[in-house]
Amino acid sequence: MAKESMKAREVKRARLVAKYAERRAALKKIVNAGREEDDEKRQAAYEAAQELQKLPKNASPIRKHNRCSITGRPKGYMRTFGISRIQFREMASAGLIPGVKKASW
C-alpha cells in the first residue's frame, strides 16, 4: 500500500493540471505560432513562454503519475483498468472484472 500522502499528492497534481489546462494550451499555441519570421509573433511567443514558466510545476501534465486506484501502487499499472497488475489478478480470479477470465489451453 502506498502512503496516503503520495496518493493525496497525485490527486492534488491532477486537480492542478485540470485547473491550468486551458491556460496552458493557449500559451503553448502562442509559443508554437512564434516560430515564424514575424518579429511581433516572435515577441509574443517570448512573452507567452515567460508566462508558461510562471505556472506551477505541478500544473504540467507530464508530472502526473499513474497509480492503482485501490492500493496507490505506482508500478505495474494497467491503464485499461486503472489498477495494478496485482489487484487485477486478484480481482480477475475472484470474477470481479466483467469479461476477463483466466486463460487456459
Image: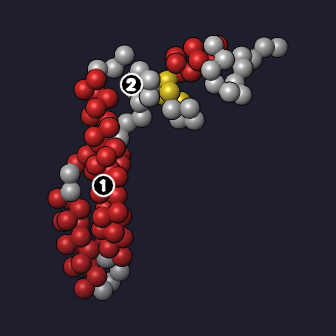
* Rendered location of residue 101, percent (x, y): 72, 20
Image point (35%, 41%), residue name: 64
* Between 97 and 29, the one nearer to me in the picture: 97
Which amino acid type is marked by label 1?
Answer: Lys
Cα distance, mark 1 to mark 2?
A: 23 Å
Q: Which mark is residue 72?
A: 2
Circle 1 residues within 10 Å: few <14, some 14–19, many ≥20: few
Q: Nearer the viewer, residue 10 or 46?
A: 10
* Residue 70 location, quadrant: top left
Display coloring: secondary structure
Element type where label 2 sits in the image = loop
Q: From the viewer's perspective, tell me whether residue 42 is left or right of residue 21.
A: left
Q: Tell me where residue 104 sits by quadrant.
A: top right
Name the spot of residue 100 as percent of width and height, x first: 69, 24
In percent of width and height, residue 98 lies at 68, 27
What number is the disc on residue 19?
1
